[in-house]
Image (cartoon, rainbow, N blue to C red):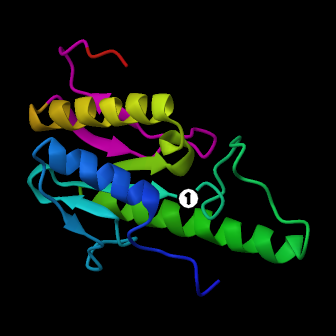
Amino acid sequence: MAAIRGKDTKPEMVVRRYLHALGYRYGLHNRRLPGTPDIVLRKLKTVIFINGCFWHGHPGCRYYRLPSTNPDYWQNKIEANHERDARAIQELNRMKWNVIVIWECELKTGEAREKRLARLARTLGDMAAGRYRYYHYPDAETETLAAEPDAGYGYEE
C-alpha cells in the first residue's frame, strides 16, 4: 500500500486543471483543515475532496468492491475511512466551510466528467454569487453533496 498515491492523483489533476482554466486559484492539501482537503478555495471558503471509489467505499459504485482476500481487514479499513471522512466534513461544516466531494467514478468517462465538472463550475459560481450559505454532508447513502440554496433564488439542479 505504500505505492498508493494520496496526492496528485489523476482525478485530482483533472479537477485542478479544470479549475485553473476557469480562473480559480487554490491551495492544496491544507493540513490545518480537518481531513486535509485536496483543494482549498479560500476566497469561497470552500474545500473539495476528490475521493477514490475503492478507498472511500463509494456506495453503489461499480468501482467499489471488497477484495476476496482478507475481507475483514478491508471492510474495517473502509469503514474507518467512512467514519474519518464524516468527522472531517462535520468539523468543516461546524467551521462554516463549504464542502464538495467528487468521486473518482464521476471523472472516469468523458461524458460523466463533463457533466460533473460543469456542475462543479455552476456550484462554485453560485457560491461566489452568494446563492448558497454552505454545504452539508447528507446521509451516507447519497453519493454527492447537496447544497442548501438561500430562499428566493429558485435554483434547480
Instruction: Look at the numbered disc 1 and give the secondary structure of its residue.
Output: loop
- Residue found 64% across the figure and 71% down from its top: 80
Q: Measured from the top left, where is residue 16 in percent x and y? A: 28, 55
Q: Residue furthest bottom?
A: 2
In front: 122, or 99? 122
Residue behind mark 1? 52
Amino acid type, mark 1: Gly
- The answer to whether any part of residue 14 appears in the image is yes
> In the image, 115: left or right of 94?
right
User: In which quarter of the view is residue 36 placed?
Assistant: bottom left
- Toward the front, the furthest residue is 110
The answer to whether residue 68 is left or right of residue 153 is right
133 part of magenta stretch: yes
Q: In the drawing, does residue 63 fall left or right of residue 151?
A: right
The N terminus lies in which quarter of the figure? bottom right
What is the quadrant of the C terminus in the image? top left
Magenta region: 131-154
Q: Where residue 112 sits in the image (x, y, percent)?
A: 49, 31
Q: Main secondary structure of the magenta part?
A: loop
For label 1, the crowd category at 10 Å Cα-Cα, with few meaning under 14, some 14 to 19 and many 20 or more, is some
User: Percent x, y for residue 46?
Assistant: 23, 52
